[in-house]
Amino acid sequence: MNGQNEVLAAASPESVKDREASGCPVNGVLEPCVMVIFGATGDLTSRKLFPALYTLLCNGGLPERFAIVGAARGEMDTEAFRELMRKALVESGKPLDRWGEIAARMRYHRLVSYDHQPSYVALAALVGELDQEYGTGGNRLFYLALPPDLYGAATRMLGAAGLAMEHEQGRGWSRLVVEKPFGHDLASARELNEVLSESFREHQIFRIDHYLAKETVQNLLLFRFANAIFEPVWNRVYIKSLSIRAHETLGVEHRAGYYEQAGVIRDMFQNHLMQVLSLATMEPPSLFEADRVRDEKSKVFRCLRPFPTDSISSHLVLGQYVAGSVDGSRVPGYVEEPGVAPDSQTPTYAMMRVFIDNWRWQGVPIFLSSGKRLQEKRTEVVIEFKEVPYSMFRNVLGEHVTANRLTMGIHPDEVVNLTFQSKHPGPRLCLRSVTMHFHYGQGYRGPVLDAYEKVLIDCIKGEQILFWRQDGLELCWSFLTPIVEKCECKDRPALHLYKAGTMGPEAARAITGEGMW
Ligand code: BG6
């Protein structure tokens, strides 16, 4: 950060006013910059990125000095690009009252191809012009809204055109944003990291995981470490098991091309579930700061006990949905979806039992599950506590007293629920389970940032706490690669079929041992 940038951002009464008026929770300085979106004519830009940018602009969540370059291969000019983005806003239901402000900051830049060096030289010239025009202090944000096989070409060309360089010859910072998938196994993830690091250093790379931008996922750390009463029981002495679920009602939709290659483990476990797992189980970092938090996450990943690949079925159940009904509508089976091979063995559901080999978690089973076309959309972390060590009510109530349960609902129920035992009202001595319920949005009326808005703000601020670091990514791949390889080899574990609209394959019960998903 240089002094000039700070002054420019601070001298922006308009955006401060907007932020205050909207209650937009942007703290810290939003430095001016030019943002270049690669893949600007694609689906991700129209559906997510551009609407998020526009919402930020309306809420004072963008720097006053800001310009956008859409870069893609399509033959079009700036006017046509603006029109495309205007339509995207209409489709996403945004009011267009401030359209003129964002339109004026937009340019289109055609790339002959993603590895065509002269196109990047011309891009560098355009970015330089915008820098002068908007006073953006030489700061540049490059967003790769591209298929992953183009990441390498685009970053190399950016590097060769001098666009990755920072703080020299009038340049400010330069940041690169990449979306998942980050490789499809350990080797390809390492390869990708090597290519990115030819031009960009780790602090310049922002690897997105949209789960980390969810408020309720962020709340896991605050809940654990801003309260003194939970941490003392957050360990193997009091906790019997931990479940992390990301259940969906959606099917594969139009993404068969990607999903057939990925399957549920790559699609959901390698990223989102691993992040939630680390937040639920890590040690408290000494400071809420990107590297200290990510250090603790990496320690968790390093402690994951490798799967016994010769008896994988006792730790992993895979499933695939067949036709059924979801929310009252008939839906086809996975193999009947467009683009899916009729004999596809791609899993759309997985339940895994993992262990963390460290002092805190030794012996505590952690159940991770995710699946498509299940009965309901539910993402949550559930902590099952142990029963009381000894029941003083055994003469009247028997030996067992139902144990406590803490549910941290992530989506769509944004809740914290604590279930405990209480006396049933009335003359007889009976117990009943009751629940203390907190809704995350309770008592809050301000705006809520969607995942892309949050991610974009953090990229502009250079705040990396919500992004993957290379070591964490590779550690997770080291754990999961032998599992996905085993699932794709000849003697792979059975694929259990489950009806769409159910709780997933029956066989998953065998893993939890309690009929609990
Ligand atoms: C994406 C996966 O990363 O996350 C999708 O690629 C999945 O397959 C989605 O549907 C789930 O996200 P959310 O926020 O709806 O739980």
Image (cartoon, rainbow, N blue to C red):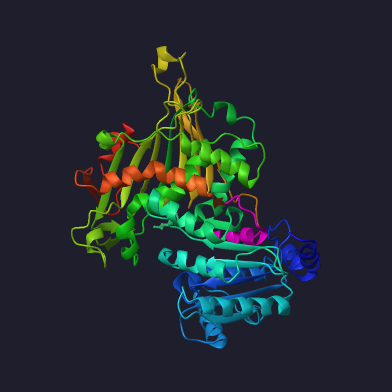
| Residue 25 visible in the picture | yes
| Residue 375 visible in the picture | no
113 shown above or below 315:
below
Find residue 455 and report its image quarter.
bottom right
Q: Position of residue 283 (x, y in %)?
A: 57, 34
Q: Is residue 462 magenta?
A: yes
Q: Position of residue 125 (x, y in %)?
A: 63, 79
Q: Quadrant of ligand 1?
A: bottom left
Q: Position of residue 63 (x, y in %)?
A: 70, 68
Q: What residue lies at 36% left-to-right and 56% top-to-bottom?
A: 249
Question: Left or right: 34 with respect to 367?
Answer: right
Closer to the camera in the image, 265 or 486:
486
Q: Which residues are magenta?
A: 446-466
Quarter holding the N terminus is: bottom right
Question: Left or right: 61 with respect to 374?
Answer: right
Quarter holding the C terminus is: top left
Q: What residue lies at 59% left-to-right and 41% top-to-bottom?
A: 221
- How many numbered circles are shown? 0
Question: Left or right: 194 with respect to 438?
Answer: left
Closer to the camera in the image, 22 or 330:
22
Q: Position of residue 189 (x, y in %)?
A: 43, 53
Q: Is residue 160 magenta?
A: no
Closer to the camera in the image, 171 or 385:
171
3 shown above or below 471:
below
57 shown above or below 295:
below
